[in-house]
């Protein structure tokens, strides 16, 4: 965006810009988080004037994408940066997504095992903690035993 205000288009564009503090409130994040994203090259303000950063619709959308991928995709800023760089910057973005899917699969397996273990404790130790249980003792000394063992 030109900051000289010489055309009506520029004036309309400037009127649609949103200051960093308003963008931060919209996403319920500190302005410092947006500045950190800027340091990492994930998002850039359209303009800086009056000592403030100003963002347009495209930059605000990009922030929404970053926040969504962090929350729903459980992605790191490095992974998000690789994807946002696009196919022209790196053909590896699909690999980043595949690796993330594999990592999530491992996390899901681990969480299921934890849920099954805790369920076993509740099912078989209603009136006492599992300490001393043969099944529990086997698991603490051979964690792989829990994959096929039953009580």
Image (cartoon, grey):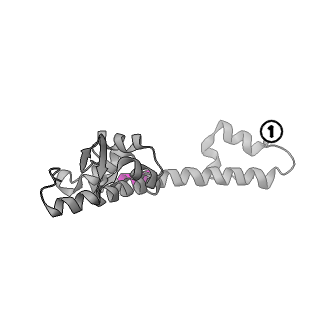
Q: Is residue 11 left or right of residue 110?
A: left
- Rendered residue at 30%/45% (across/down): 53
Queried whether the magenta region covers residue 100, the answer comes back as yes
- Rendered residue at 23%/63% (across/down): 12
Report helix, strand or loop for mark 1. loop
- Residue behind mark 1: 132
Total of numbered circles in the picture? Answer: 1
Q: Position of residue 60 (x, y in %)?
A: 34, 56
Where on the picture, by quarter, is residue 150? bottom right
Q: Residues within 10 Å of mark 1 (few under 14, many from 20)?
A: few
- Rendered residue at 72%/54% (across/down): 119
Q: Position of residue 89 (x, y in %)?
A: 18, 51
Which residues, given as a range, are shown in magenta?
99-103
Most extreme residue toward the left, as rendered? 6
Per the picture, the main secondary structure of the magenta-coloured stretch is helix
Query: Of residues 20 and 147, which is closer to you in this image?
Result: 20
């Amino acid at each position: 965006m030109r900051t000289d205000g010489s055309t009506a288009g520029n004036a309309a564009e400037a009127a649609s810009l949103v200051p960093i503090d308003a963008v931060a409130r919209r996403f319920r994040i500190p302005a410092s988080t947006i500045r950190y994203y800027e340091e990492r090259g994930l998002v850039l303000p359209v303009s800086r004037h009056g000592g403030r950063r100003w963002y347009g619709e495209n930059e605000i959308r990009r922030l929404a994408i970053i926040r969504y991928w962090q929350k729903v995709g459980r992605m790191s800023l490095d992974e998000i940066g690789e994807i946002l760089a696009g196919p022209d910057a790196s053909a590896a973005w699909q690999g980043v997504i595949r690796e993330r899917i594999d990592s999530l699969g491992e996390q899901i397996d681990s969480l299921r095992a934890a849920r099954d273990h805790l369920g076993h404790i509740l099912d078989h130790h209603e009136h006492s903690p599992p300490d001393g249980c043969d099944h529990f003792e086997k698991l603490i000394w051979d964690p792989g035993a829990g994959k096929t063992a039953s009580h």
